[in-house]
Amino acid sequence: MADPALTPMMQQYREMKARDPDALLLFRMGDFYEMFGEDAVRASALLGIAVTTRDKDKEGAVPMAGFPHQALETYLAKIVQAGQRAAVCDQVEDARQAKGLVKRDVVRVVSPGTLTDEALLDPRSANYLAAVVESGSKMGLAWVELSTGRFSLTSLLRTELADELARLNPAETLASELALDAPWLRALRSQQQHVVTTRPSWDFQVEQARKTLFEQFGVATVEGFGVDDRSPEIQAAGALVAYLRETQKSSLGHIARLTPYRRADVLALDETTRRSLELTRTLREGKREGSLLQVIDHTATPMGARLLGEYVASPLTSPELIEARLAAVEELYQDSGLRADLRHALGEAYDLERLAARAATGRATPRDLGALARTLALLPKVKARLAARRSRRLAELEEALELCPEVRAAIESALVDDPPLSIKEGGLIRPGCHEELDRLRSASKDGKAWIARYQSEQIRRTGIGGLKVGFNNVFGYYIEISHAQAQRGEVPADYIRKQTVKNAERYYTPELKEFENEVRNADERANALEYELFTTLRDRVSADAPRLIQAGSAMAQVDVLSALAELAAKQGYCRPEVVAEPVFEVEAGRHPVLDAILPRGEFVPNDTVLTPDRGDLLLITGPNMAGKSTYIRQVALMAILAQIGSFVPAKRARIGVVDRLFARVGATDELSRGQSTFMVEMTETANILNNATRQSLVILDEIGRGTSTFDGVSLAWAITEHLHDSVGCRALFATHYHELVELEKTKPRLRNANVAVGESQGEIVFLHRIAPGGADQSYGIHVARLAGVPSPVLDRAREILAFLEKQHGPDPGLPEPEGPIRRKVKSGRALQTSLFAALPDPLLTELRNVDLDALPPDQALDLLRRLRELAG
Ligand code: ADP
């Protein structure tokens, strides 16, 4: 394969590149990482670095681009943020000792889903690597977080895949190269933010996958983890492990358990619902700031923040499990001293899970191990404070909180108190810990005393007061004398000139040279020994990684429960009663985000009652900006809060668990996806109608808005009927189709509500108070009056309104498909003109309505005057 035209180094490069052609190969050359050929061009666009060539004049010269090695982390971050993979190829032998070409090897492959470095990860969010495989009628899905060792898997239907991936939001997803044409994979790849990495189909084959997993977990079957040995998720899990092994080139000892995941245990939330409710990101800007997660997050550790993110992404459905969390939150809520102590201790903790995982993947720095030991040192206090707690959950956590004292002792006895970041430059290991190291160090330290002595001796000998003995990395030790003094001819004959610098001459003596060899050797040997001692220590910690991660996970749970208690105390939340029946009864409920953002007391609380006997479908009419969507979202968010085991922003709450929550609020950003708003809206509505159950909760905002008025009303009408008659779930609709108000007459479980609007000093005031009954239709005319629209126009508007109400105001059973207006018009615009055309003359209308027999003479005169006015 060797190409004689290539230099040996380029040959080496080619070999490395061929191992993983898709990854950007960062090839270490001296102090730089270089990329060649197509990689250089790709890197230049991605990283904004210049492309050059080595041999500018030669035709077909290979393009190259590079950056200084110190900037590696920064550029790696850019590469993974762009969804790409990079292979870091280092010099693996000392260039000074190399015979011929220095040996190089790929020491790590960094991809979006396999990050462990602190600098590349967001400490407060999980970073998943997922794998998907199609097997018969099922899909296998597995996901792992390399930086904490969590590994889960499940099988699902093809239609369920998108929702699960929306829940996990993986940084990278693996799929078999054979699946490239599968529609689900094409759909995944078309999503911009979704990074898909294709892998050999071999990795996904059942037998191969089983073998990989058995090796990883040291078992002969995975059934012990509660996973069927031949299920499709095994194939996905096997492919994950194979990829990690290939890219990490390190032990994966911290991945010690497989956790099967059951969809039924988790409240189902599709992608639109997650986005509509702004659970972890805002709808418009996609920021964490302003999301539910951000406002409720009072965690003290990054581990806790990640776990809370997981809670919000996957609320529970079992009332027992929810109650268990709630009981723990309540205990911490009531005992503010306990809460403060725990939060204080946790506030000092570092990210135990990720530190342990870094130890296990051989990436922990001395500083990491120092942080790990300091975190372990906090555990006894946390554990002691958790002792003898009432709630079962806290008692369990107390037990799960392993102190790992041996790991702590091993680190504390070996590592200095404030260890450096680098492992290669010494200064990590505590004195008195290793005899040989102490000896080498004292040789080096004695050396320093020797220099001081040597310097004063030389000053005495030469009589040159400014003489200095110094050191630099290139020239080693030297004696420095200023030019002026040197020129006076006072330099002894045994000084050998070494270097001339700006104002001085530098010399050495045979004595100094000999000393240098000794000291340098001792230093180098000491550093090498420290390095060795450190890696032994890291291996020691790595062996306990699963236990450390378990302790970290227990800390995270304590943190989340205390944070939820803190939130409840700060924001005045109440403990919800979580029940199995499909009810939702809340007194004085608030929107958790607005409540936290608005000045205290400004948010107007509202009650919500949805029960099978008092009605569980609420239709809210009212003008724009009245607070309809806020109200319906607040109901959905309270259900989510309750089901993650949090208190809720209300005075009192009784909430029946929801199995699936559907939210369709606002269609702001759909157009950019190239589908019409209305098509998107209907696809999502179809999803709701097909999947909602009696136990679900549906919130819909302005459904049918994307089409003409009559289409819209008819669809909204039929959808409401279907949900009422066939699904029978709890639902809240916000609409400004007043026609729907009529449904209340025939649908026993549907109730109307409106948002109260008042007037103060000639201005409309939104009271944000939900009141029973449909909204006042003439609100728009009301606003027009306040705005100074002339009264004849307003009067005319009222007449038209009255006519419209009469003409097609929905009787029960309407809208009538063949009504007169329907026949004439196709779009809302056409509707306007045709309606006006169809209107009778108000003069005639008024005349016809006059009851001459019952008209007293004075009123007759009034009437005449009005008719005269109308006639203009
Ligand atoms: P709609 O859906 O009726 O158009 P929104 O729900 O979007 O109205 O509410 C409009 C604005 O009114 C919100 O941005 C918020 O600032 C304010 N608002 C809504 N509900 C309340 C409330 N209960 N208390 C205080 N302010 C509210």
Image (cartoon, helix red, strand yellow):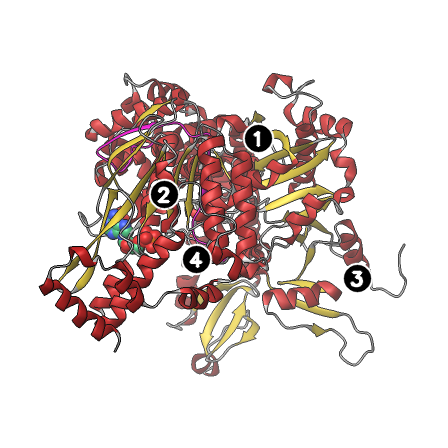
> Badge 1 local density, few (<14 within 10 Å), some, or many (20+)?
some
What distance separates the C-alpha of mark 3 from that of mark 4? 49 Å
Q: Nearer the viewer, residue 551 or 294?
A: 294
Q: Can you tell me whether the CB of the residue at mark 4 lies under 8 Å from the nearest atom of ligand 1?
A: no
Q: Position of residue 290 (x, y in %)?
A: 35, 52
Q: Where is residue 712 in the image (x, y as percent from the top left)?
A: 48, 52
Quarter of the figure with residue 849: bottom left
Q: In which quarter of the image is the C terminus?
A: bottom left
Residue beneath disc 2: 742
Q: For the residue marked with disc 4, what is the amino acid? A: Arg
Query: Quick check: marks 2 and 1 in contact, CB under 8 Å?
Result: no
Residue beneath disc 1: 152
Chain part drawn in magenta = 646-670
Q: Can you tell me whether the CB of the residue at mark 3 lies under 8 Å from the nearest atom of ligand 1?
A: no
Q: In the image, what residue occupies the spot 44% across and 58% down?
A: 451
Q: How many labels does the image show?
A: 4
Element type at mark 2: helix
**Label located before the other in sequence (3 or 1):** 3
What distance separates the C-alpha of mark 2 from that of mark 1? 50 Å
Residue 513 makes an appearance in the image: no
Element type at mark 1: strand
**Label located before the other in sequence (4 or 1):** 1
Q: Closer to the camera: disc 3 or disc 4?
A: 4
Residue beneath disc 3: 10
Q: Indicate which disc residue 284 carries.
A: 4
Q: Nearer the viewer, residue 282 or 587?
A: 587
The answer to whether residue 700 is left or right of residue 649 is: right
Element type at mark 4: loop
The answer to whether residue 614 is left or right of residue 251 is: left
